Structures are given as C-alpha cells and as structure tokens.
Image (cartoon, rainbow, N blue to C red):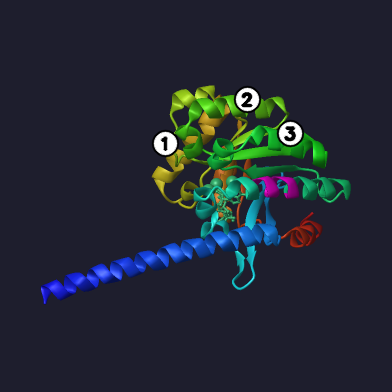
Amino acid sequence: KAKDAGKNTYLFYTMAMTVASYERIGMENALREAIKENQFIVYYQPQIDLKTHELIGLEALLRWNHPLEGILPPGRFIAFTEETRLIVEIGAWILKQTCFDVVALHEEGIFKGTVSINISGVQIEYSDFLRTLKETLNETKIDPKIVEMEVTESFIMHDPERWITLLKEMQKLGLSIAIDDFGTGYSSLSYLRKLPINKLKVDMSFVKDIPKQEDACAIVNSIITLAQNMNITTLAEGIEHKDQEDYLAEHGCKQGQGYLYSKPLSLSDLKSWIKIHF
Ligand code: C2E
Ligand code: MG
Ligand code: MG
Ligand code: MG
C-alpha cells in the first residue's frame, strides 16, 4: 500500500512538472505575442508635493492588456519576463512609449512635471541599456531633466560597482536617479555613500503602518533624516490615508504617491483626472 502511495506521488509529481513546463512555454509564447501585438500599455500614477499638494510627477507602470484576462498588473508577469529576459525588449518599449506620452502631455500644456520609469537589473545585465537610453532621448526629444530612472536596492546590491558606473553615466545625460522600495533591500550604507542618487522612495510596507506603529515611524523618520543629510529628496509610496500624509509631511518627507491621490491611470483617464483636480 505504501508502495502504491509512493508511486502515485511520483506520478503526480511528474505530471505537475509537465504541466508547469507547458504553462511556462505557454506564458513565454503569450508574452512574445503580446510584444508583437502591442498588448502592453503604460499606466501613470500621480506624484504629489506633500506641502503644496501640486502634481509634480508621474510614475510609469506597465500593464498587460491580455486578450482573455483583461488588464494584468506586473505582479502577474514581470518576474517571468525577467527570467526569460523578455524584459529587455519590453523595458525598451515602455521607456520609449512613456517618453512620447510625456512629451505630448507637456506640449498640450496638460502637465509640466517629471516622469519616473522603473528599470530592471536584467536590462542592464543583458543589454546595452545606456545606448537604448541615449537613442530614446534623441528619438523622443524629451528633456532628460524631467526623466527619473527608478531602480530597487536589491538590484543595485547585486552588482554595486556596475550600477555606480552606469548611474553616473545616466546622471551625465541629465537624468535623475531614485532608489525604489528603499528600506527593503539590504542596502549597505557604505555603498549608499558612493551611489549617485537624487531620491529615496520610502517603501510602502513602512508607510502602511504609520502613524500607529512606532517601529514603522522610527524607520520612516530615519530614512527621511538620512536623505536630508545626503541632500537628496524623499517620496513616500503607498499613501492611502490622510493621517499617513499628515505624519509624513510633518516629518519632512517631500513627496508622496498612493491611492489617497490616485491609482495608476491609463493616459486618457490621467488627462481627465488632471482636468478635474488641477
Ligand atoms: P513599484 O515601482 O514599487 O511601484 C509601486 C507599486 O505600488 C505599483 O504597483 C502601484 O500600483 C502600487 N501602489 C501605488 N500606490 C499604492 C497604494 O496606495 N496602495 C497599494 N496597495 N499599492 C499602491 P504595480 O503597478 O502593480 O507595479 C508593481 C511593481 O512592478 C512595481 O513596483 C515595479 O517594481 C514593477 N514594475 C512596474 N512597471 C514596471 C516597468 O515598466 N519595468 C520594470 N522593470 N518593473 C516594473
Ligand atoms: Mg517604482
Ligand atoms: Mg516601490
Ligand atoms: Mg517594487
């Protein structure tokens, strides 16, 4: 009997493996199709000055308009695009699309702030990202001064020396650099000193628990103070409630982003949102 059970377990295991690999191939094909068929879209989430409540920036966030499942968030597919390196192509696409969109928003006089674009470590490891960046700046004629590149601590700590060189080159092009999800990625302070950065983005896992939880408040305050001492700015992510905003503003955090202001929006919804609120 025990033997049968063992055999069944084995059978089940190989079947599961097969299904998993079919699923992976299916997913990879679907993503290649998505690139070819222009199924990706850019959503934009407003970034707000916590003192003046003005709209100061937008973060570009990738969405997949799946033919059967509708609009999918990056949590459903980004890791997979990194494993398969499809993020190199998709990342180049979102960079260009975002620059075109923001140039148009500026020209239409609807928006005059900055735009933040997320980059993955896979893009810098497996492509000449600096070259892609230069080509896109030339092609879209966007003013590099309004473009901010976001990279997570974990990617940087994976290969700090390489990132330091690359980020310096990006700043030479006129771009700004923000560290995304700050506080979650084991940053070493000695590297932080060497990194050419303009902004720390306070991760929403801390923002979620302020002002009620003391430990979260302590961490948020330390990040704000650290940034102030480094002469760089701070943006808090995931602000959902007024008491979080009040706490952050009182403690010197400069900017915020979160559902309190707006969820990420399609370009046309963003335009309506701006017209209503500003
Ligand atoms: P992220 O860069 O840290 O982006 C912030 C995420 O927090 C977004 O999720 C946003 O929708 C969500 N968010 C913002 N405000 C709130 C809030 O008040 N409450 C809650 N619960 N969530 C909030 P999203 O759009 O699903 O993106 C998830 C992650 O996927 C991003 O985290 C980023 O790491 C990655 N990602 C998105 N677009 C790109 C891209 O174009 N390239 C790369 N490499 N990664 C991307
Ligand atoms: Mg980000
Ligand atoms: Mg983040
Ligand atoms: Mg993130």
Q: Nearer the viewer, mark 3 or mark 1?
A: 3
Q: Give the secondary structure at mark 3.
A: helix
Of circles 1 and 2, the one toward us is: 2
Does mark 1 have its CB less than 8 Å from ligand 4? Answer: no
Precedes in sequence: disc 1 or disc 2: 2
Question: For the point 49% across and 28% down, which residue is it?
Answer: 160
Residue 127 in which image quadrant: top right
The local crowd at label 2, few if under 14, some if 14 to 19, many if 20 or more residues have their Cα within 10 Å, is some
The residue shown at (69%, 59%) is 36
Q: Position of residue 203 (x, y in %)?
A: 51, 45
* Residue annotated with mark 1: 186
- Locate residue 147 relative to residue 31 in the image: left or right: right
First in sequence, mark 2 or 3: give its number.
Answer: 3
- Disc 3 marks which amino acid? Lys
Residue 50 located within the stretch drawn in magenta: no
Disc 3 marks which residue? 134
Circle 1: residue type: Tyr
Segment colored magenta: 91-97
Q: Position of residue 217 (x, y in %)?
A: 45, 43
